[in-house]
Image (cartoon, grey):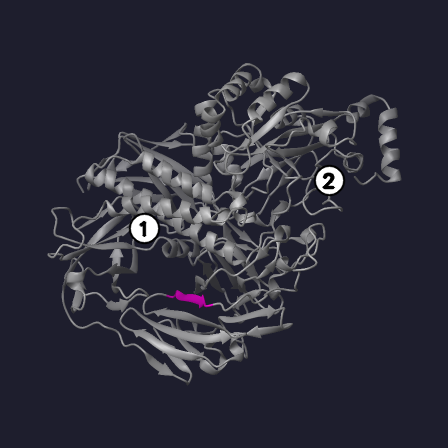
Amino acid sequence: MKKPKLYQKILLLFILLVGGTTLHAQKTWFVDGYHGGVYGHYPEWQARFMVDKLTDIPDWKICLEIEPETWDTVSVSDAENFKALQEYYANTGRFGRIEFVNPTWAQPYCYNISGESIIRQFGYGIAKIIEYFPDATFTTYSVEEPCFTSSLPIILKNFGYKYAVLRNPNTCWGGYTSAFGKDLVNWIGPDGTSMPAVPRYACEGLSTINCYATNSNANSEEFIAASFDDGVKYPVGMTFQDAGWRHGPWLGNAVKEYYKPSIFATWTEYIEMVKDKVEHTDWAFSLEDVKPGLVWGSQVLQKLAQEVRVSENRMIMAEKMASLNYLYTGENWPAQDFAEAWRTLMLAQHHDCWIVPYNGRPGHTWANNVTRWTNSSNQIADEKIDKLFSSNGNSNNKFIRVFNTLGSIRTDWVAISLPENLKGKDLSVLNKLGKELPSQLSTDANGNSIFQFEATVPGMGYATFLLKKGKNIKSSANKLSDRIIKVETDFYVAKIDPSKGGTITSLIDKKHGNKQLVEEGKYLNDLRGYFYQEKQFHQGSDSNAKISIIEDGELFTQIKVENEIAGQPYYQLITFAKNSPRIDFELHIDWDGQPGIGAYDQSKNYKAEVRAKAFYNDNYKLLLQFPLKGMTDKLYKNGPFDVCESQLENTLYSSWDSIKHNVILNWVDVENVSDNYGVALLADHTTSYLQTEDLPLGLTVQYVGRALWGRNYRIHGPTHMRYALIPHANNWEEAEIESESSKWNEPLIGQIITSSNEPAQRSLLDVEDKNLHVSATTVDGKDLLVRFYNTSSDNKKQKVTLNCNADKIELVDLNGKVIDSIQAKKEGNGKLVTTLSMPQFGFQTLRLVNAKLSNN
């Protein structure tokens, strides 16, 4: 442990000697506790160990961050000792000796998953803890890992939390928060929700002897002296030990040298002791105050992030579809099935999946388990989605029913897998007015016939379309070219040059003054990376590519570009829609061997305590480049229930002590303010993006080499990823980019059905403003719960039309507690109309008591 400097020793001596008001400053506090669980680490003896130590050491107190599912296991496998823990908590622990601080099901990082996933993590976790500890309270949120995101204040307050702790001093391998403030801050979320929180003090530096700690992890004399010196009146340190460590009290047992007196406290005890004695500095904590340093671009992380994203999307869509099914058919709400599906998805969001994906037995690593867990969730979700379709594959199929899970009307194309009896036939599709719609017949990668057409579907509902014999809609295919390909739609004129690796060398936006989007002499969607075994950069534009026109039909034109980089073959699919500004891409790389990709080779000299690491430097990873002309003024990025304007000059860093928030959750958007124009990039998984002086935007694709704990992050098969570009006028909000992202993640769902007696079209609800999003719908008993999320900065009231009846409508928190009543007016057509008012990035949950389908 580093010894305090001379001036700090003098300061401490002064504090000890002077009297009056400064005597109280002699005391310091320390929060101890345990982190882990049955999926991470939790030995059977842990329950008895905690009870015995707490009994033997009356001054010791602990905070618990234990995976709630742990109690299911130990209540059976270690029943006697677990019962002793339950009794101790009921009789003694809940009165200041034990505090539950993080009840999330699998201790997720939070910034890397959806807002709805975070809500489920808390909701299911709290319910499980209360099942075993009925008197449990949840007052202060605190974590061992950097499990933070900017929108937590509104989520925490909705669950009844009062306070939070914004530091993780002893587990910073995967990142940490910004240093800010003193004793307490008002943690202000993007929607304006505020709650008192203990920050990582402005004077709380990173450890100089390792790469996993800040200076508050052991109440060292150096840390306490620095705190007093900076004006901290009531210094407090913390360490959450891993369950299974046998130290007992961290100070005195594991750590011998520390400032005395250091008094053990729970977080709530400490905060309530000091909150009225100190000034609370306001802190508008942003996404960029979370500084995560994961191995972005590693194939193992990329794959599991994609699997988690797919399951998140399917689960939200399945819940919405099951809500419709409950109202339309009377089908019981499958609460147990959804609980199991969320359980496995939540486990796939466990922080250890993301930071130690290789840990575990062969075949049972965290990464292997993510695949199993998400497959299980997907199976249940798909069953619920299919419930609303009937007689699939029947020889008398005549109709296509298409569902929209978003809250507003949309026109988009939908893809239908054709049954055997319709394969090879000429087909067309008509809307309810008998108008023939644009359609296209394709073949997917597995050889299946895919019928696609453009459908207009009302909000949170469905529309039915007539399928009949028609013209041959097979699009032209397999046109090869060794010359520049020109693609023109109502939106763009694009040029794709095979001599430049099949990159887009020109992209003109016809809708906005024929604006050229590609920087002159540079290439859009080009691959570039440093191959350190060869000690040189390679990029796809250095090679000649083969270009094929795969499809050219009424809906879209799709181009296939086949190329290689550093001898590694890859292809890109580029899809230009005829009636949409979004340009879709797929990248597929068939790797040969294990090429080293990154800043340098650390295979022989990796040292955990050395701050500089090759895997931090995105500029040398294989990445997709987007040299967008003039798009350098502003960058926005979304997070869970948030959109953040970046304050970074660039995203580059190369060492643990300089981590920057370079994370793309769903999208980033770059903007030219003077032109009032921007371009959004959508990604199919959480990863990192790049922004430098030379490159307005890049997307990380691949890193290969040593990384956290010296593990070799290897290539395990092909790389396959999807991304999209959306050029637009105005800023991200006016261009409704969050809504466009929702469309991409929640596509229209369609299947061929037989004729039925049901109405041809239905809509459960409709929102006029596309910046008001239906975040989730669920059913509780006979009540329909609908959660709305607002990305509009306009403070106007937003109209919501409900096509159902309810005894009353209540505004409730995430625990189900009634906050207020919502007034709704019944219109002449039987529809309920209400207005909602919430701040930008706020959400509200409505309970429609005894919801029933209206006659319309």
Q: Nearer the viewer, residue 269 or 309?
A: 309
Note whether residue 666 is visible: no
Helix, strand or loop status at disc 1: loop
**Amino acid type, callout 1:** Ser
**Relative image position of residue 307 (x, y in whole percent):** 43, 52
Q: Nearer the viewer, residue 445 or 113?
A: 445
How many numbered marks appear?
2
- Residue 233 versus residue 516 in the image, above or below: above
Residue 595 is one of the magenta-drawn residues: no
Q: Magenta residues? A: 581-590
**Residue in the picture at 39% in, 74% down:** 560
Q: Helix, strand or loop at disc 2?
A: loop
> Residue 7, percent across and down?
88, 38
Q: Nearer the viewer, mark 2 or mark 1?
A: 2
Residue indicated by mark 1: 408
Frontmost residue, 584 versus 90: 90
**Residue 144 visible in the current orientation:** yes
- The residue positioned 42% from the left and 83% from the top of the image is 484
Which quadrant of the view contains residue 831?
A: top left
Magenta region, main secondary structure: strand
Please tell me in which quadrant of the rendered image residue 623 appears: bottom right
Kindly check if marks 2 and 1 are in contact, taking CB atoms under 8 A apart as contact: no
Q: Amino acid at mark 2?
A: Asn
Q: Which residue is mark 2?
A: 215
Task: Say few, some or many: other residues with alpha carbon within 10 Å of mark 1 (under 14 / 14 to 19 / 20 or more).
Answer: many
Mark 2 surroundings within 10 Å by alpha-carbon count, few (fewer than 14), some (14 through 19), many (20 or more): many
- Tell me: 103 left or right of 801: right
Query: Residue 740 falls in which quadrant of the image?
Result: bottom left
